Image: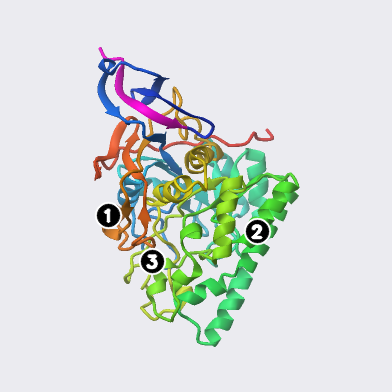
Amino acid sequence: MNTFDLIVKNADIITASDRYHGDIGIRDGKISMIAAGLNAEDARQVIDAAGRMVTPGGVDAHCHLDQPSTDGSIGADDFISGTRSAACGGTTTVIPFAMQFKGQSLQDAVADYHQRAEGKACIDYAFHLIITDANPAVIAELPAMIEQGYTSFKIYMTYEALKLSDHHILDVLDAARQLGAISMIHAENDDCINWLTERLKKQGKTAPRYHALAHSPIGEREATHRAISLAELVDVPILLVHVSSRAAIEQIYWARGQGMHIFSETCPQYLFLTAEDLGIDDSFHGAKCICSPPPRDTDSQNAVWTALANGTFTIFSSDHCPFNNDATGKKLHGENASFDLVPNGIAGLETRMPLLMSEGVLKNRLSAQRFVDLTATAPAKLYGLYPQKGTIAPGSDADLVIWDTQTPKTISSAMLHTNADHTPYEGKEVQAWPAVTLSHGVAVWGNNQFHGAAGQGRFLACAVPFPSEG
């Protein structure tokens, strides 16, 4: 009888804290032993990593899959295509959002989302909650939601159909404090956006590029400061999602200096795109890159890189929210639609880790250990999935990525596995891509082919990340 189902030999093993060479023995989907010189004859299968970097499978803690909309748009990816795309890019756990519509119970929102995911996910998944209606009955539901493993709530400070008042944000933060949960906040000033949008439209400035002006970094800075202030008032940790600008980063850095527990997230679009990608003329082409907050200028790009390296950012997520460039998505209201009517979101699940490995680790902007922390370990810890996910250790799930850093690739829509019909990173060269992705010790990606199957993924109930008052 074999001791192991699989041994990954000659691995350059990287965790958030260590880097060393060894072999990884896997049994029943778990890492059972890490040692030097494991005997290949003790395994049913052997993969020779040949000295290549081996990291934990990525945990993408911010993505939108088959999420119902309020405007009639249809996202490009469901749980099959989205998780397939994730696996091919080295991500083995995703946490998308169960969105509550106003007037809907959280339990009904979660039940609907389970129906959308059941039997489709190719890799493991958990759910965040989106709370759009924080009335007393909904707040009263939160303890039961926590018990069922939904320990993170996303709340919005903008979008008419989604935003909460400061009073209701405080109610949610207070509940999170009592329950030990984490609140994720989309911090943009809604009135600033609407005021600027009205002025731009009166001037006939409706092309996609004006989206970047309407979603000003000043509005992001103000909302970031206000979110921090509300968290300070309640004395509770929060996570600020998809931070895009130097102005917002400086608010987070200041709050950290005051001793506040402010976590933060950024995304690939703020490293690799700028406002110019939304267009330098009035053509509709830039609609493909409309997302909120929008990409900024090179100064903010540099600030994001610095904040990734120095620890200001806690996690690095894709905010994958793809819409096809057709009447179901970006052209929902036609090719001449005003920027404020274009569905917000871009694809990024598959390219998140290769982009950061190529441009961060291989170009010495980040250590390999910091890469692991940002893409796997920190999100697993923040959302109550560690050490099952996010590390390479005995007892952890055998979710691993063996990296190929010797074969340059040029990103194109044709090579990706999302259902989205375009990628914002078309034509960008990368030096790193997963050679093999393992989920529970089984290859779901290898030899440039997807080997997984719908329904392989398991739902994960999350633990609370912080001790509750009770």
Query: How much space separates mark 2 and mark 1, taking CA atoms?
Result: 37 Å
Distance, label 1 to label 3, CA atoms, is 25 Å
Residue 415 badge: 1
The quarter in which the N terminus is drawn is top left
Vertical arrangement, residue 345 with respect to residue 96, above or below:
below
**In the drawing, does residue 353 fall left or right of residue 266?**
left
Front one among 391 and 99: 391
**Residues tagged 2 and 3 counted as in contact (Cβ below 8 A):** no
For badge 2, the amino acid type reads Thr
Asked if the magenta segment contains residue 83, the reply would be no
Q: Is residue 436 left or right of residue 203?
A: left
Of the two numbered discs 1 and 3 in the rendering, the one whose residue sits closer to the viewer: 1
The residue positioned 45% from the left and 74% from the top of the image is 341
Q: Position of residue 348 (x, y in %)?
A: 40, 55
Please provide percent x and percent y for residue 456: 30, 37
Is 336 rendered above or below residue 461? below
Q: Is residue 215 visible?
A: yes
* Quadrant where the image shows the C terminus: top right
**SS type, badge 3:** loop
Q: Main secondary structure of the magenta part?
A: strand
Q: 37 and 166: which one is in front?
A: 37
Neighbour tally class for label 1: few under 14, some 14-19, many 20 plus, Cα within 10 Å: few
Q: Earlier in the sequence, mark 1 or mark 3?
A: 3
- Mark 1 belongs to which amino acid? Met
Q: Which residue is mark 2?
A: 224
Which span is picked out in magenta?
1-14
* Residue 447 rendering spot, x and y as whole percentages: 24, 41
Give the residue at mark 3.
73
Q: Are marks 2 and 1 in contact (CB under 8 Å)?
A: no
For the residue labelled by badge 2, is the local secondary structure a helix, a strand or a loop? Answer: helix
Label 2 vs label 1, nearer the camera:
1
Q: Is residue 165 visible?
A: no
